[in-house]
């Protein structure tokens, strides 16, 4: 453990003994935690004994002389844990400008931590400038391009109860991963029931798409199916899907990758679109009833000439609804069969 | 310089650049595959660091954005001429090895050597368009270090292939910069911000 003049850090599960300042062991004292008296069963003489401390025992501890109620000692107890090995990630989403590294702890320590990061390229130590937000991130500007020498990034996390560290080693190309494409738009194509026009933009974080072009991967499927169709596109920021199922709503996403190096971005935000369908004609006369529509629709409407039941003559519901007329016919056939 | 900027020269440059970019992409893909085979065949550790070897052109640069068209072409040409000689030497050493796996490695090396030669020719053509003309071969680079032991030769080979893979990426970028300048869609390779 370590004791600041006002703060005392202790590990979860530790046994803590607090002395009441310079008071003798046999002095009469009163201990309080966060303004509440502590039961004398926790005292050994004037010492406060806390066994197997847990997080709920963090707080302000005060010791008062028995008769005068003079404050003799005060400390802020912070119960926490030493840091576990941090999780570190480095990525270049703005190649060739630089890369960033971000980190987090796999489990909280419940006490303040400080992070120190070092970046070494060959024999050269580089500066990783910490971001204001988020706080657990810093960025490095590339001083060289096309280097075979690996980068070595070491992150050390320290708190009052201990320290831990992790190291990543990688080469310049391996961490290049653009952000997903932006502004993905999918539209039906007029008079084309099987086409959808998709367009998108380069991620705004990619600084120079002309010199460092991206290629794209598009995936799409109708909502009613689980299987994706994929198309890889080496240039351009648009594509026309030509094999869509007529009338079905589609979900579409796009990913990006530098043309030459690195890995694919995450998928873009999904967009939905349904191919163009012909408007069903409005039925006003019996002569128009026999016209047929040219595209499938989402719900089936039986043609009026096949109507066999009036609404009021239906018995039952759902799949077993039967109208009286049909019932009589079926009964007649049944009798004949018997 | 007027000839270098004529419409026909610009079209020729664009054509050479786009073919060169495709060749660089194929070359890189083949070199990466060759690297995997080489590491396995030679019993090397893929993650081993190899110190810079004399005579192997280093692709790393701190001033890539500031380079002029001519500088890019000259540096590329010097590199690929050096790689041509290095790969020829590696091939000669490889052909002394016995075994089918070694023969396969030798064939892969020969294929890459061919691509490197073709790319060097492409660069010479591009330099002709710059009205500079390619420099003579004598200034291609220092002579290769002779009489290396077997292990040193293996490490040198690893270094050669790694740098060649980096150069293939750099060359594609360089040719895109040249192609952009030819289109006139932006000014000549701008000094832009430093990396």
Image (tube, coloured by chain):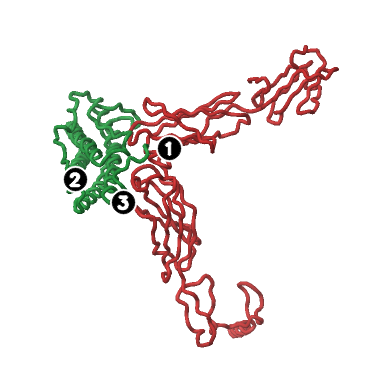
Chain colours: A red, B green
Whether marks 2 and 1 lie on the same chain: no
Which of the two labelled residues, at mark 2 and mark 3, occupies the earlier sequence position? 2
Q: Which residue is mark 2?
A: B1
Element class at badge 2: loop
Q: Are marks 2 and 3 in contact (CB under 8 Å)?
A: no
Q: Position of residue B166 (x, y in %)?
A: 30, 37
Which residue is nearer to you in this view: B42 or A315? B42
Near mark 3 (Cα within 10 A), the count class, few <14, some 14-19 or many ≥20, is few
Q: Which residue is mark 3?
A: B185
Element class at badge 3: loop
Q: Quadrant of residue B126?
A: top left
Residue positioned 49% across, 64% down in the render: A249
Q: CA distance from mark 3 to mark 1?
A: 28 Å
Which residue is nearer to you in this view: A188 or B179? B179
Q: Is residue A185 above or below residue A322?
A: above
Q: Nearer the viewer, mark 3 or mark 1?
A: 3
Q: Can residue A164 be seen?
A: yes
Assign the N terminus of chain A to one quadrant of the image.
top right
Q: CA distance from mark 2 to mark 1?
A: 39 Å
Q: Which mark is residue A99?
A: 1
Residue positioned 40% across, 62% down in the render: A241
Near mark 1 (Cα within 10 A), the count class, few <14, some 14-19 or many ≥20, is many
Residue positioned 24% across, 26% down in the render: B54
């Amino acid at each position: 453990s370590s004791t600041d003049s006002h703060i005392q850090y202790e590990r979860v599960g530790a046994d803590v003994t607090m002395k009441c300042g310079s008071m003798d062991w046999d002095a009469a004292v009163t201990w309080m935690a966060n303004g509440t008296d502590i039961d004398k069963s926790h005292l050994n003489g004037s010492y406060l004994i806390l066994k197997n401390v847990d997080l709920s025992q963090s707080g302000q501890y005060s010791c008062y002389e028995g008769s005068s109620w003079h404050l003799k000692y005060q400390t802020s107890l912070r119960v926490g844990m030493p840091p576990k090995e941090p999780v570190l990630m480095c990525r270049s989403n703005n190649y060739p400008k630089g890369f960033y590294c971000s980190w987090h702890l796999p489990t909280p320590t419940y006490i303040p931590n400080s992070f120190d990061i070092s970046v070494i390229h060959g024999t050269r130590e580089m500066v990783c400038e910490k971001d204001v937000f988020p706080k657990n991130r810093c960025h490095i500007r590339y001083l060289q391009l096309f280097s075979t020498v690996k980068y070595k990034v070491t992150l050390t996390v320290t708190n009052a109860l201990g320290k831990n560290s992790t190291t990543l080693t990688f080469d310049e190309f391996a961490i290049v991963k653009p952000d997903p494409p932006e502004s993905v738009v999918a539209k039906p194509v007029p008079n084309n029931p099987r086409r959808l026009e998709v367009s998108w933009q380069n991620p705004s974080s990619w600084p120079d798409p002309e010199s460092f072009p991206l290629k794209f991967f598009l995936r799409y499927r109708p909502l009613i199916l689980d299987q994706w169709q994929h198309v890889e596109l080496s240039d351009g920021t648009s594509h026309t899907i030509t094999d869509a199922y007529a009338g079905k709503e589609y979900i579409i996403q796009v990913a990006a990758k530098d043309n030459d190096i690195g890995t694919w971005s995450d998928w873009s935000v999904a967009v939905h679109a349904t191919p163009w369908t012909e408007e069903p004609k409005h039925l006003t006369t019996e002569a128009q009833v026999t016209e047929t529509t040219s595209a499938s629709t989402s719900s089936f409407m039986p043609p009026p000439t096949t109507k066999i039941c009036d609404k009021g003559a239906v018995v039952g519901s759902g799949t077993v609804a039967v109208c009286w007329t049909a019932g009589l016919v079926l009964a007649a056939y049944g009798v004949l069969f018997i | 310089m007027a000839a270098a900027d004529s419409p026909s020269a610009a079209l020729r440059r664009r054509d050479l650049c786009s073919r060169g970019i495709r060749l660089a992409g194929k070359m890189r893909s083949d070199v990466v595959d060759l690297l995997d085979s080489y590491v396995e065949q030679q019993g090397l550790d893929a993650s081993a660091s190899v110190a810079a070897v004399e005579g192997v052109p280093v692709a790393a640069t701190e001033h890539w954005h500031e380079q002029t068209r001519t500088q890019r072409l000259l540096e590329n040409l010097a590199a690929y001429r050096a790689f041509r000689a290095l790969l020829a030497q590696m091939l000669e050493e490889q052909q002394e090895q016995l075994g089918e796996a070694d023969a396969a490695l030798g064939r892969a090396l020969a294929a890459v050597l061919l691509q490197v030669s073709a790319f060097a020719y492409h660069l010479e053509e591009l330099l002709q368009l710059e009205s500079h003309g390619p420099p003579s071969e004598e200034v291609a680079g220092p002579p290769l270090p002779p009489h290396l032991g077997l292990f040193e030769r293996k490490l040198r080979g690893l270094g050669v292939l790694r740098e060649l893979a980096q150069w293939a990426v750099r060359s594609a970028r360089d040719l895109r910069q040249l192609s952009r300048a030819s289109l006139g869609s932006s000014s000549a390779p701008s000094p832009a911000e430093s990396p």
